[in-house]
């Protein structure tokens, strides 16, 4: 078990903060984290300061990394003069976007106020097609349209046009006023709903889309379902967001065939026909008193997994009020002490804020370009190898080349590693990483046939429960993923038996895919044998039943 570096005089809070910010100072054998480089852009009306429409609370949340395997490196930019931004009077075509893994856009200005030009749209489209991730949000009506309404994929995943449809028939965004507005405010600590309830410690409840994994059809109640990785938090499914009186809307486009041309560059909007999805819905509770509003549900978060088509991922949100200070940490000088502090005012509020900030960090992880995803995966695997739970449970006799670990041992360690990683990277992210980097990259043809069983988020057709011939493989999907993860952990532990700076230096230069490849091969063969043996036993059992006479 690794010895902790003893730092005289350090208290538990300082120790935890140091581990979050500079874990290699406490544990010198850890690899330096991957740098997830984010360009965060707003325009007139937004800032990165502590004012109500500032993003300082978001920046503070992202200063705490998702785990010791990654750090968010954020460059702030405003399309106007803004002393709170690192880059002022920003233009996308005058900056090298290749320096970033992703771009976050908080558009405030309406149509006609410094709209993006053709050269800027070309630069963004090329960035996205090269694998760069994009997050974009506005608010009600056409707030945010100046920056976002023409960007590929972003334009057709969220409503940006108001008061009429867009030039290509894009739907009209919801009004700011009237009974059809998207008012998600919930009563605070009284029975009255007022404007400032958006700044209290009571969040709105959202309904995430759930994606079922596959289990034997005779036990449907045991089939677990997963939210989208953006809403998969350390405490479970993320079901809360800040509330607001007039949100925008995300939707699912039916047109997957569009091509767009900017400044001579043509991009296919949805290559390979991979469609975006609404991954969560918000709810308006009907009211007839005070400020009447009709009840309804609407898309609150949308996501497009462009990595399946070798382009960047995209996420959109109904409103930047889910990110601005006024909805997170309260209104400066408000006479109500809770509304002056927002979610930080109470224990219940802080618990909700923990889930909300997990969503922010998930955005940073999920939107990262493929090379950054791979970097995070291998560093998280290295971190898991040295986690005390794994160190204590590895059995030395299976760490020698002469003794192959049985399937049961591989699954045992793999399940524990998945649990350990899930505490920091989210269980959904780990599930996806194991499938893509231990199986898909090594066995692309096999992955095509197995993807619908091993990846709950796959857009490919899924088998209907109970169909003939669809029993054995789904029942062993999790066994396969845990086995290959267990094999990868064994491979790293065998190659690096001691924790030291020398081990870390060696690990910095190693090709992890090559290191674990042979073990993954052996794990796959072991699972094949296991499934075949169980198939024969099931066949024998069936024969006994058929000859019951």
Image: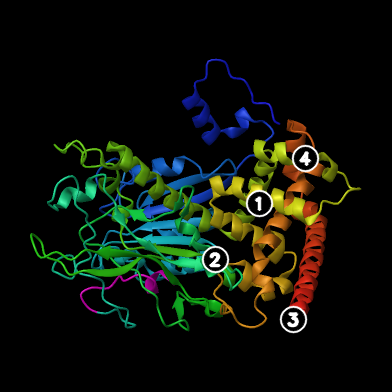
Q: Are marks 2 and 1 in contact (CB under 8 Å)?
A: no
Among the two numbered marks 2 and 3 on one chain, the one whose residue lies closer to the N terminus: 2
Residue under the point 83% across and 44% down: 399
Q: Are marks 3 and 4 in contact (CB under 8 Å)?
A: no
Tell us which disc is closer to us: 2 or 4.
Answer: 2
Chief SS of the magenta region: loop
According to the image, label 2 marks what residue?
Answer: 223
Q: According to the image, label 1 marks what residue? A: 415
Q: In the picture, which quadrant includes the C terminus?
A: bottom right
Q: Residue 548: give its label.
A: 3
Q: What separation in Å lies between label 2 and label 1 (alpha carbons)?
A: 17 Å
Identify the image quadrant of the N terminus. top right
Which range is magenta?
Answer: 152-164
Which circle's residue, 3 or 4, is located before the other in the chain? 4
Image coordinates for residue 222, horizontal then vertical, percent: 54, 64
Residue 216 image point, x, y percent:
61, 70
Nearest to the eye among marks 2 and 3: give it.
3
């Amino acid at each position: 078990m690794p010895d902790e570096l003893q730092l005289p005089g350090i208290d538990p809070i300082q120790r935890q903060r140091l581990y979050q910010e500079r874990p290699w100072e406490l544990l010198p054998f850890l690899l330096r984290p991957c740098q997830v480089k984010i360009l965060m852009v707003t325009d007139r009306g937004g800032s990165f300061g502590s004012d109500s429409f500032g993003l300082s609370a978001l920046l503070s949340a992202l200063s705490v990394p998702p785990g010791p395997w990654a750090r968010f490196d954020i460059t702030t930019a405003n399309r106007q003069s803004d002393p709170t931004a690192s880059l002022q009077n920003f233009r996308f075509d005058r900056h090298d976007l290749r320096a970033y893994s992703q771009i976050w856009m908080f558009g405030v200005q309406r149509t006609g106020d410094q709209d993006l030009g053709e050269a800027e749209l070309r630069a963004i489209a090329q960035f996205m097609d090269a694998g760069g991730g994009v997050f974009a949000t506005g608010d009600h009506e056409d707030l945010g349209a100046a920056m976002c309404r023409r960007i590929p994929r972003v334009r057709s995943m969220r409503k940006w046009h108001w008061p009429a449809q867009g030039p290509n028939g894009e739907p009209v965004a919801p009004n700011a006023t009237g009974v059809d507005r998207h008012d998600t405010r919930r009563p605070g600590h009284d029975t009255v709903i007022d404007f400032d309830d958006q700044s209290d410690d009571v969040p709105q409840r959202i309904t995430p889309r759930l994606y079922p994994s596959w289990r034997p059809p005779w036990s449907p109640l045991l089939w677990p379902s997963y939210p989208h990785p953006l809403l998969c938090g350390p405490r479970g499914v993320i079901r809360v967001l800040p509330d607001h009186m007039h949100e925008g809307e995300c939707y699912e486009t039916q047109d997957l065939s569009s091509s767009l041309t900017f400044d001579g560059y043509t991009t296919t909007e949805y290559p390979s026909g991979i469609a975006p999805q609404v991954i969560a819905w918000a709810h308006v509770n009907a009211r007839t008193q005070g400020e009447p509003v009709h009840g309804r549900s609407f898309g609150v978060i949308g996501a497009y997994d462009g990595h399946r088509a070798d382009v960047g991922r995209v996420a959109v949100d109904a409103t930047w009020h889910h990110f601005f200070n006024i909805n997170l940490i309260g209104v400066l000088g408000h006479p109500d002490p809770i509304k002056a502090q927002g979610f930080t005012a109470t224990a219940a509020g802080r618990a909700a804020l923990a889930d909300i900030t997990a969503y922010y960090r998930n955005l940073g992880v999920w939107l990262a370009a493929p090379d950054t995803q791979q970097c995070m995966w291998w560093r998280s695997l290295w971190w898991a190898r040295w986690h005390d739970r794994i160190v204590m449970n590895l059995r030395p006799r299976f760490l020698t080349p002469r003794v192959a670990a049985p399937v049961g041992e591989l699954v045992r360690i793999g399940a524990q590693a998945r649990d350990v990683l899930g505490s920091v990277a989210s269980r959904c992210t780990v599930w996806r990483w194991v499938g893509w980097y231990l199986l898909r990259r090594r066995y692309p043809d096999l992955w095509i046939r197995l993807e619908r069983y091993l990846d709950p988020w796959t857009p490919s057709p899924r088998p209907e429960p109970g169909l003939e011939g669809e029993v054995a493989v789904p029942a062993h999907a999790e066994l396969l993923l845990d086995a290959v993860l267990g094999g990868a952990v064994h491979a790293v532990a065998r190659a690096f038996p001691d924790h030291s700076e020398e081990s870390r230096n060696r690990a910095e230069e190693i090709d992890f895919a090559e290191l674990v490849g042979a073990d993954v091969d052996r794990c796959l063969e072991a699972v094949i044998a296991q499934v075949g043996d169980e198939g024969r036993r099931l066949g024998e059992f069936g024969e006994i039943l058929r000859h019951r006479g």
